Image: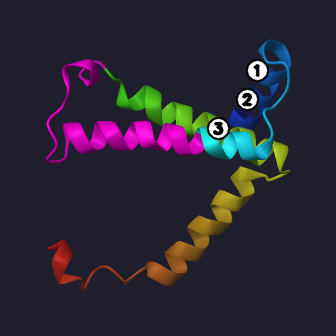
Amino acid sequence: MNIQNAQKAVDDWIKEHGVRYFNELTNMAQLTEEVGEVARIIARRYGEQSEKESDKDKDLGEELADVLFVVLCLANQTGIDLQQSFAKKLDLKTNRDHDRHHGNEKLK
């Protein structure tokens, strides 16, 4: 599935199962909440914090998918073609950063 198809799938889901999109500010708050859940798993599973028993069954992939879902909602409701925007960003980063990190001693 490409990004355009994902945006359409989210829009179809909202139309079929939701009442409407939450407004942009609510979705921004939801995005922050979902990113926080991802951060909690990463910090406890891969970082130095101890993982609580209640967090051990949390699925990182599911939490990342929650983030993606809300990002796709925001793109849809603000008229952003995320496929096009992502391709443009990837080109920009490729041209700007092609050799940028190769000499970084921190990455060796």
Q: Quadrant of residue 37?
A: top left
Q: Could you say which disc has been placed on residue 45 in the image?
A: none
Residue at left offset 37%, top offset 83%? 99
Which class describes the residues within 10 Å of circle 1: few (<14), some (14-19), or many (20+)?
few
> Answer yes or no: do the residues labelled 1 and 2 have beta carbons within 8 Å?
yes
| The magenta segment | 31-57
The answer to whether 9 is drawn above or below residue 94 in the figure is above
Residue for badge 1: 13
Q: Position of residue 106 (x, y in %)?
A: 18, 77
What amino acid is labelled 3 in the image? Val
Q: Residue 63 or 28: which is nearer the viewer?
A: 28
Determine whether the residue tagged by mark 1 lies in a helix, strand or loop: helix
Residue for badge 2: 10
* Quarter of the image where the C terminus is located: bottom left
The answer to whether 27 is drawn above or below residue 16 in the figure is below
> How far apart are the alpha carbons under marks 3 and 1?
12 Å
